[in-house]
Image (tube, rainbow, N blue to C red):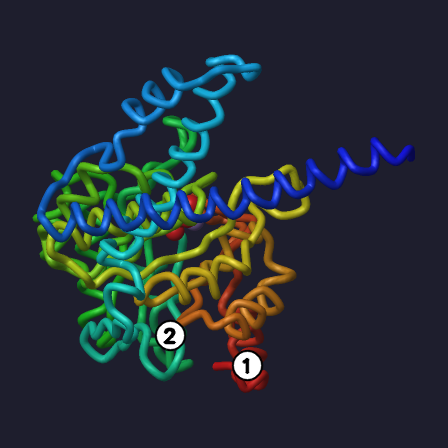
Amino acid sequence: MSGTLQQLQSQLNGINRQLLHLLNEQERTAAEIVRIKEEQGISEADPIGVQQMVSELISHNQGPIANDTIMNFFKEIFHAYQKKQNNAKTEQKLLVSRRHKSEDTIIRVKQAEFGGVSPVMIAGPCSIESRDQLLTVAAALKNAGVTVLRGGAFKPRTSPYDFQGLGVEGLKIMKEVADELGMVTISEIMSPSQIDTAARYIDIFQIGARNMQNFDLLKAVGQSGQPVLLKRGLSATLEEFILAAEYILYKGNDRVMLTERGIRTFEKWTRNTLDISAVPLLKQETHLPVLVDVSHSAGRKDILLSCAKAALAAGADGIMVEVHPNPQAALSDANQQINIDEFHTFWQGLCDSGLF
Ligand code: PEP
Ligand code: MN
């Protein structure tokens, strides 16, 4: 490099460093303006007046930079700064956030405790198909020491021609069986109109993946005050997931557990991809219990134990697994449900691992 070029290069580096210093000064000053305005109770959508500042700047521009370039550059900087401020504020304000409540939320439902010292096993068939079917599986589970029984009565099926669940009849069966055995129950509801009826028969409402952003349903279960197991949507980001939970808390109900149940990816060897990182992230960002549904994430039986161990090792507060007395004949999710013997092996494996 010639001497002049070298000199210009180092001059440019110097200018860049000064700009960097000034940009940081600019952010600090803008933050101070926002802080003082907030203290004085002045809440404006644009507290630092980006538009006005940029127009003022352009009126002083003597070139050679074009006004458009100046405008885009400064708007970009201020908007990035505003976005950062807004994100920090929303996170602080969220009721689900650890910043709002630092200690773990423990949800007690009869003899079950979600988010407490020991993880919880939730097991049962995908759908309630008959009293016999549910009683057979529930009695086996109870014998093994499982206290929380799952079973769908209102089924969100991809095709309208598939089994849609027994509806209220199914819930009645569930209550009868659970009362007989002394178990806690979880079943899915799909619409606010089902809340009052379902509340008579089940202990915990499940909101399924397909309804994670059914905002009317979220608000309604929020008002109901009944414990809610909220599943992550099929392609929901963690931010969307926690904001869905926020709807429930915002309506006055903090008895919410989050359930990772796998997300859609390009992978075909599993029904969904179990996002293990969701567990520590949700535990870190929220104070709610975090569970992992191994059946709907894997969509197959052979890797359930490894997935459940991974979930517990990552900090999950519980595991959900689908168990059916005769999976081949199941009216829904036949491929992924395990039979009672397979459940015993799965359960033993978890107990032996020392994670449960
Ligand atoms: C279920 O638990 O039966 C179910 C339908 O799960 P998901 O909403 O996670 O698909
Ligand atoms: Mn299922």
Pointer 1 local density, CA inside 10 Å: few below 14, some 14–19, many at least 20 = some
Q: Position of residue 323 (x, y in %)?
A: 45, 62
Q: CA distance from mark 2 to mark 1?
A: 14 Å
Residue shown at 46% from the left, 53% from the top:
261
**Residue 328 to residue 283: above or below:** above
Give the number of the mark in front: 2 or 1.
Answer: 2
Question: Quadrant where the N terminus lies?
Answer: top right
> Which residue is tagged 1?
348
Name the secondary structure under disc 1: helix
Give amino acid for label 1: Gln
Q: Is mark 1 within 8 Å of ligand 2?
A: no
**Residue 82 to residue 356: above or below:** above
Give amino acid for label 2: Val
Residue 341 placement: quadrant: bottom right
Q: Position of residue 310 (x, y in %)?
A: 58, 69
Q: Nearer the viewer, residue 33 or 238?
A: 33
Residue shown at 13% from the left, 44% from the top:
220
Residue shown at 37% from the left, 50% from the top:
28
Q: What is the count of numbered marks? A: 2
Q: Position of residue 324 (x, y in %)?
A: 45, 59
- The answer to whether residue 134 of the structure is visible from this angle is yes
Q: In the image, which disc is placed on residue 120?
A: 2
Disc 2 vs disc 1: Cβ atoms closer than 8 Å?
no
**Residue 88 left/right relative to 193:** right
Q: Position of residue 313 (x, y in %)?
A: 54, 74
Pointer 2 local density, CA inside 10 Å: few below 14, some 14–19, many at least 20 = many
